[in-house]
Image (spheres, grey):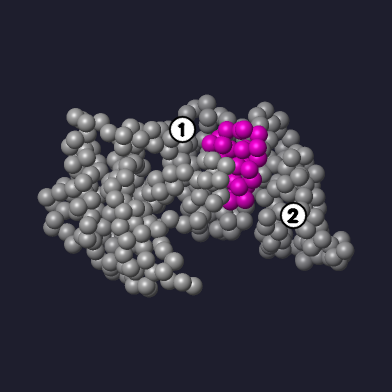
Amino acid sequence: MDDNKVHYIAVTGIIRNKEGKYLICKRSENEKAFPGKWCVPGGKLEKKDFIDKPKDTSDHWLDVFEKVLEREIFEETRLKIKNIGYVSNLAFIRPNGFSTVIISLFAEHESGDVLLDKEALVDYNWVDLTQVKDYDLIENIYEQMEKVDNFFKDKKNTPSQTENYSQERSEENSNFNIIEQIRFFVEEECKKPTSKYGYEPYLGHFIPVVKYSKILGEKFNADLEILEISAWLHDIGSIIHGRENHHITSSEIAEKKLIELNYPTQKIKQVKHCILAHRGSQDIPRETIEAQILADADSMSHFDNIIGPLKAAIVYEGLDQFQAGNSVRDKLIRSYNKISDDAKIIIKPKFEAAMLLLGDQNGICT
């Protein structure tokens, strides 16, 4: 690997609150880069930040830095931000010899109180430009804050393209904020010791359901926001309470959580319908395209993770390996038969591969 061609890309945020103060955080002494220094929150751009999301053009994802900043700020501090704009960029060499390019952005604090991720950041404070000089800051952060401060001083008298752009981005990214908070809620519930099936369903079921929901949603011009929220929450009742009536418990949990997040009442009703109707065994009529897509995506996800159903059959249902294989094979056949024709086309190669792998009733591959 050519070290000259290897770069980390990171995004950091100068966050300003209504009192005109800026958020600074202290890095853990265990951090490899700048241990113990005061900084502003942010994080690395990774391929997963965009690769599974819908493209904004036929070939490209747009505004990736802004979306990463929103995610990182929420994960590290639990703050929601708005009105994102550009400050500067810089590069440095990490202790491992690789270079890092940092994109510095600014944003305004929208809501939430600071709750730090104590693994990376151990302390925080809101400071003005005079106070920040008393802290052991990473180089150039003060200059970035000063640039942002001057921008806000001039803002009232000279509206800029950055301001207009930031206001547009705030509205555009409101959907991202609600979806990210719901995703985070589901992941945290899966991580808890009380989770009925542990963390594995998050990786092996929730993520594939979201993936297929977005694929079908784009194909049929469905409401992607309703779909993604429904996909993240459709089985949350199983995680918290268990499988029995999980379509009902999931819809109740979804309603409560979305009310907490001030989600529109009419949209909450749409999400609840998707969740209630996704369970094929209940024969609840699917009144919207989003409800049908979620049901298809739920069944399609079974083909992404055969090991998960096999483990459930053996560990949780107490079946032997042959019984488990038969049970999973029959479940996959039922799943395949009940999905729509468009979903069948997408999932057919995985269905055929699963049938070949699971074999006949004696476990013999044909």
Q: Which residue is mark 1?
A: 263
Q: Is residue 212 magenta?
A: yes
Q: Amino acid at mark 2?
A: Lys
Position in image of residue 177 (x %, y %)? 43, 41
Vertical arrangement, residue 280 with respect to residue 202, above or below: above
Q: Give the x, y percent position of residue 51.
A: 54, 51
Query: Is residue 44 rendered to the left or right of residue 182?
Result: left
Q: Quadrant of the C terminus?
A: bottom right
Element on which disc 2 rests: helix
The reply to whether the C-beta atoms of the residues labelled 2 and 1 are less than 8 Å apart is no
Q: Amino acid at mark 1?
A: Tyr
Label 1: element kind: loop
User: Which residue has dot 2 on it?
Assistant: 350
Front of the two marks 2 and 1: 2
Q: Position of residue 48 (x, y in %)?
A: 51, 54
* Residue 104 makes an appearance in the image: yes
Cα distance in 3D space between marks 2 and 1: 37 Å
